[in-house]
């Protein structure tokens, strides 16, 4: 390699304060996804990133229109014979409940106790900026005028609302997107002190169930007893989603699930796991889920379904003492190797039809248009190169293996661009993605930037 670890780390250390201030400037832009009044902020965010990439040296930057927000495309391809790598991430952020934030307001970033707080600081503006800093450190440490690999960046503006326009965007600009590999940077690390390389991601399928009872909300004193109650019926249905062993009860649901290999079980078992540490970092009260599997196996390698919203009657304000006419629940399925979203969608339809009762009717909306298939990274030299780069970036003797519990358009990218995907992100479970007081570890951002700088060296040296 053309540079050694101290040089890369020294460059990052020298510039760390200025680069964190730069990230804070971007976090101040409230680029919230799926909110019409924030559309101009999404454009402001995209323009800010495009300008920053130009200032870093990328000779080509463009804004690509999406369905709900613009994407930023940039390329720096001045390394003949070297691999071409696409970096994927996003600059849109989740909506906020400002009243729940304690450390700061969502778009007023602050640095405190080694962390930068603010919406998007970790998911995923911090991850994007780690790539920007990595390019700068890579150039400064090697003395090169251009990266050792051919770099292309695609940072979309509608990931948090389901990437509805991404497939069309990839088709429209396919001629620009011939690459050898994809680095997916919307991901978590296992632990700040124990770096692990992510090699799989679960798929995602959302659905909404609406149970219909009386034709209107009706005074409980006038009809209580013979009237159908959709809240009770919905609760009964949701109680049947899992069996006594924690398994999802949809008939046929596990037919296509691949059993874990002994090699994968050993990889996950090698990661340091302490229940108290997990509960503290994840802010969860207890550990549950499917029996017969470890917590990490349940998290990354087994399917799950969660109720993420539940509403009926008068949840706010004074009660009207009325039987509600409707009750609703939003479900989020996480699916794994072997499963397909279209098959799970049909299993859910059959289960809902067979389960509804209590004199109620039901409406089911399944969000197949923004569903995401699971993906597993194939055996590729890129994994070995990233392993070595992470060891150098984090100063670790060895790098573990992990999965990604969430979802993302990984399979879409791999399929359309016909290139393998590797995962590298700088998030941690304690960063509070999608929650109040989101933050990012500055030390992890710096180690992530060092990792990526080393990765470009690693890949550039293979030409």
Image (tube, helix red, strand yellow):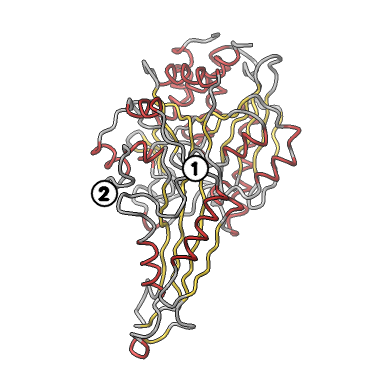
Residue drawn 39% across the image and 57% down it: 241
Residue drawn 40% across the image and 50% down it: 435
Whether pointer 1 and pointer 2 mark residues with C-beta atoms closer than 8 Å, the reply is no
The label shown at residue 37 is none
* Gap in angstroms between the C-alphas marked 1 and 2: 31 Å
| Residue count near mark 1 (Cα–Cα under 10 Å), binned few <14, some 14–19, many ≥20 | some
- Helix, strand or loop at label 2? It is loop
The mark that comes first in sequence, 1 or 2, is: 1
- Helix, strand or loop at label 1? It is loop
Indicate the position of residue 338 as horizontal and vertical percent values: 51, 39
The N terminus - image quarter:
top right
Say which of 15 and 336 sits in front.
Answer: 336
Look at mark 1 in the image and give the residue it sits on: 256
Say which of 291 and 190 sits in front.
Answer: 291
The C terminus - image quarter:
top right
Q: Quadrant of residue 229?
A: bottom left
Left/right placement of residue 144 relative to residue 303 reads right
| Residue count near mark 2 (Cα–Cα under 10 Å), binned few <14, some 14–19, many ≥20 | few
Residue drawn 45% across the image and 76% down it: 360
Task: Reply above or below: 112 against 7.
Answer: below
Residue drawn 46% across the image and 41% down it: 257
Q: Quadrant of residue 302?
A: top left
Look at mark 2 in the image and give the residue it sits on: 285
């Amino acid at each position: 390699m053309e540079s050694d670890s101290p040089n890369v780390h020294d460059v990052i250390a020298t510039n760390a304060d200025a680069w964190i201030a730069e990230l804070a400037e971007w976090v101040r832009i409230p680029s919230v996804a799926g909110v019409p009044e924030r559309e101009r902020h999404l454009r402001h965010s995209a323009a800010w990133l495009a300008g920053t990439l130009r200032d870093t040296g990328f000779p080509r930057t463009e804004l690509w229109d999406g369905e709900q927000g613009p994407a930023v495309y940039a390329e720096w391809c001045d390394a003949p014979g070297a691999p071409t790598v696409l970096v994927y991430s996003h600059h849109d952020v989740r909506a906020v409940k400002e009243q729940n934030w304690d450390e700061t307001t969502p778009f007023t970033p602050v640095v405190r106790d080694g962390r930068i707080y603010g919406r998007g600081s970790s998911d995923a503006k911090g991850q994007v900026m780690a790539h920007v800093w990595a390019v700068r450190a890579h150039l400064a440490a090697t003395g090169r005028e251009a990266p050792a690999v051919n770099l292309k960046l695609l940072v979309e503006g509608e990931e948090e609302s389901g990437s509805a326009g991404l497939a069309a965007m990839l088709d429209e600009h396919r001629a620009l997107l011939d690459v050898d590999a994809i680095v997916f940077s919307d991901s978590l690390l296992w632990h700040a002190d124990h770096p692990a390389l992510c090699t799989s991601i679960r798929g995602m399928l959302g659905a909404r169930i609406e149970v219909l009872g009386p034709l209107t909300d009706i005074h409980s004193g006038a009809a209580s007893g013979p009237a159908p109650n959709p809240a009770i019926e919905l609760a009964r249905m949701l109680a049947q989603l899992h069996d006594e062993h924690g398994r999802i009860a949809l008939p046929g649901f596990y037919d296509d699930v691949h059993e874990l290999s002994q090699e994968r079980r050993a990889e996950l078992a090698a990661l340091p796991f302490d229940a108290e540490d997990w509960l503290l970092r994840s802010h969860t009260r207890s550990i549950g889920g499917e029996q017969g599997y470890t917590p990490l196996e349940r998290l990354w390698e087994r399917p799950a379904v969660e109720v993420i919203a539940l509403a009926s009657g008068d949840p706010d304000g004074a009660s009207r003492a009325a039987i509600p006419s409707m009750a609703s629940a939003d479900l989020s399925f996480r699916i794994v190797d072997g499963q397909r979203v279209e098959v799970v969608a049909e299993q859910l339809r059959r289960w809902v039809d067979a389960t509804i009762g209590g004199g109620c009717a039901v409406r089911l909306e399944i969000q197949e248009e923004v569903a995401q298939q699971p993906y597993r990274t194939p055996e590729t030299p890129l994994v070995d190169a990233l392993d070595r780069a992470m060891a150098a970036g984090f100063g670790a003797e060895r790098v573990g293996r992990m999965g990604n519990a969430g979802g993302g358009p990984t399979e879409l990218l791999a399929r359309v661009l016909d290139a393998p995907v590797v995962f590298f992100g700088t998030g941690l479970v304690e960063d509070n993605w999608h929650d109040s007081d989101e933050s990012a570890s500055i030390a992890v951002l710096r180690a992530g930037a060092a990792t990526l700088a080393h990765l470009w060296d690693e890949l550039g040296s293979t030409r």
